[in-house]
Structures are given as C-alpha cells and as structure tokens.
Amino acid sequence: MKVTKQELKELIKTKLHRAGLQEHHADGVADVLVHADARGVHSHGAMRVEYYAERIAKGGINTNPNFQFEKTGPSTAVFDGDNGVGHVVAKEAMDEAIHMAKANGIAAVGVRRMSHSGALSYFVQQAAEQDLIGISVCQSDPMVVPFGGAEPYYGTNPIAFAVQGKNNEIITMDMATTVQAWGKILHARSKQETIPDSWAVDKEGMPTTDPFSVNALLPIAGPKGYGLMMMVDILSGILLGLPFGRNVSSMYEDLTAYRNLGQLHIVINPAFFTGLDGFKDSLTASMEDLNNITPAPGFDKVYYPGQRSAIREKNSEENGIEIVDEIYEYLVSDVVHNNAYDHKDPFAK
Ligand code: NAI
C-alpha cells in the first residue's frame, strides 16, 4: 500500500518512541528509514522497525547514551556512540567529520560502539550536500562465506560514496559487498518471492533460489568482493579496536546485549585539491556523458549510481511510498513488538 513520507515518518517515530527511544532519537532513526524506503531501498526501511523496537524494548540499544567525540589528530577523531541507536550515532559522527574536513581538507572519524545504522547512503549524502566527498564503511554480522570457504565469516560489510555536481545532483554509490544485502532476502521472504541463484547458498553450500533456504550469502565478484569485505572489516573493526570477522555481534543472537559495532566515515574536501566550481562542472559533465552513452539492448538508459534512487525519491514526494501491507498494519497497531527476533537463527524459516 502507499503512504506519504510524512505519515510513514510519524508512524516509525511513534513506534520507536513507544519502544523506549528518546523522541529526538526516534525522529532521527525515522528520517534514515524513510530515506531508504523513499529511494526504493526497502531492505533498510520500515521493514526493520519491529526488529529495532524489540531490541530497544529488551535493552539491546542504549536509550540514554553519552556520546563522546575525541579528536586524535588534525584530521582524525573517534566518536564513541555508547551503544546508542546506530542511525543517530552515524549521523552525528558524520556532522563532526564534515566540520573537520571543511577546516582541514580531509577527516577520518572512526565510530565505535554503535548499533546497526541502516542505509549508508544517508550519511555520505550529508557530506555531499555540503560540497564534500563522503565515504563510509561499516561492519555487519557474519553471514557471508569468504571466497573458497564453506562457513560464514564476514558480514555484508557495505561501502558508500557520494559527491554532488553543479546542479545539486548527487552520485551515490552505496552497496553491500555481497551480491545482495541480507535485507533483500528478508524482503523476498516478506513478499514470498524467489531469489536469483547467484545471491546465496544453502546449508550444503549450493546456490539456492528459495529465500527461506539461505544459509550464507556470497561476496560480489568472488575473490574481489571477498577482499573488499575484508578491507571494510579492517577499517571499521580492527582499526577501531573492535571485534572483527566472525566475532562481530549477531543481529539476532541476543537482543538484550549491546552490539558494539564500528563504522568509519572519511570526508574529503575537493576545494583543497582543485577549484570547487571546476570540480563540480567536471562531475556534472561526467554524469551527462554516462547518461548519453548508447544503451545496450534491453536497457532504456545508462544511469549514474544513485540516479534511479533519486528519481524514486522525487516520485515518492508526489505519489507516496509503497510499503508491504503487513508492515503498515504493524506500524498502525498498538503492538510494540511480537517477540519475533530474539535468538532467531537469521537463516531460519
Ligand atoms: P543495491 O544493490 O540496491 O545498489 C547498489 C548500487 O548499485 C547503488 O549504488 C545503486 O545506486 C547502484 N545501481 C543499482 N542499479 C543501478 C543501475 N541500473 N544503474 C546504475 N547504478 C545502479 O544495494 P545493496 O547492495 O542491496 O545495499 C542496500 C542497502 O543496504 C545500502 O543502503 C547499504 O548501505 C545497506 N546495507 C547496510 C548494512 C549495515 O550493516 N548497515 C549492511 C549491508 C547493506
């Protein structure tokens, strides 16, 4: 069914506040989730609310965190989120990185001790909207077989990048280092759809099309994606003194425990490298070049990364956001959560 952005945001905010989040934190999370749904990234939108609500209600997210920001060098800092809700922690840490990069040309802010932060596009776009280049990577719970392995070790460890052209159009590359994010499997489950056999493997390590038979995900491009997810684990885990690899906390194992996750924001100020106007002119020229490439058979057009999501986002302003009926019914109900996620095997049916 279709809902307006405003209605969806209000419903999410109300539910998370009822679960125990402070109102302004609930508002911050709702903003990130609606951003994802509006851009068509439903895997990281409203469908996650019930999981977050259960974790908040059971104490697995600190609802009264004491954020600590420590500058560790001219361009480096550590933001300790005190296991507050990840979306708000990541957003505030990005605000600090933006501030530092404006003054110093570059900033790397390590974000320690946070919960799941959702779609990384939100945070890198914060930087892009300020004429900076935003880069962000984060850990996620182990559910991917390393290349050549038969058991999960890494998470879906996403990488995001955003930069703005001269007409405020934003390139947003934001991707899990798996063929698909785990949320896409959850989305397929919620819609009772099959998945392509290139996304995941079953208990025997064989490719599967049944989202309910998935036992581990596959990295993008074999050993290359495996290398990228390792890089993300080092930058957002080992570099920040946090658990890494198979020791990264599980999304569902114990909803009463803090997750202690890590994320790294890197912000580059183009004005410290070249003239900003020329940089933005060239970016826009590059985007136009891509859009003018002759499309291959079966394609209507070549899009730059994030362009189709930006079109969907604009469209959602006028026509609302499509969300699954059961999710809407949960959001408008009085139920905070249905005890559906705690100690759940993520791969269980
Ligand atoms: P996706 O597969 O939907 O898109 C990946 C990239 O491909 C995007 O940059 C998109 O703009 C681009 N793209 C897609 N179709 C295109 C086309 N026709 N032309 C040009 N570019 C195109 O993204 P994925 O990997 O499913 O990730 C979804 C979300 O999940 C992301 O927001 C990511 O940050 C989030 N995520 C978050 C995690 C966390 O722990 N916080 C873990 C894993 C993913």
Image (spheres, rainbow, N blue to C red):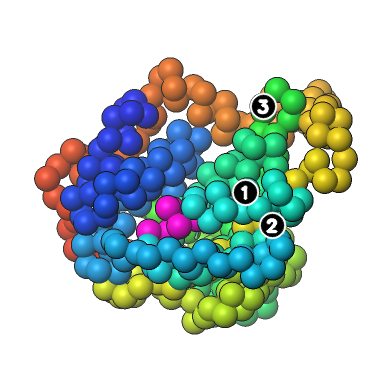
**Secondary element at image label 2:** strand
**Distance (Cα) linking label 1 and label 3:** 20 Å
Q: Nearer the viewer, residue 113 or 3?
A: 113
> Where in the figure is residue 339, as x and y percent of width and height?
19, 63
Residue 30 visible in the shown view: yes
Earlier residue among tags 2 and 1: 1
The image shows residue 11, relative to residue 21, as above or below, that is above
Relative horizontal placement of residue 209, taking residue 133 as reference (left or right): left
Q: Secondary structure at mark 3?
A: loop
Report whether residue 268 is seen: no
Q: Position of residue 270 (x, y in %)?
A: 79, 43
Asked if ligand 1 lies within 8 A of label 3, the reply is: no
Image quadrant in which the N terminus is located: top left
Report the mark closest to the observer, 1 or 3.
1
Q: Is 199 positioned to the left or the right of 222 in the image?
A: left
2 or 3: tag closer to the N-terminus: 2
Position of the C terminus by quadrant:
bottom left
**Image mark for residue 168:** 3
Q: Nearer the viewer, residue 21 or 119?
A: 21
| Mark carried by residue 139 | none
Instruction: From the top left corner, tell me how far across and down residue 213 is, in percent.
Output: 42, 65
- For image coordinates 82% across by 29% down, the residue present is 277
Q: Which residues are magenta?
A: 85-90
- Read off the residue under disc 1: 99
- Name the disc covering residue 107, or none: 2
Whether residue 86 is in magenta: the answer is: yes
Please tell me how crowded label 2 is: few (under 14), some (14-19), or many (20+) other residues with Cα within 10 Å: many
The amino acid type, in three-letter code, at marker 1 is His
Name the residue at 34% across, 69% down.
252
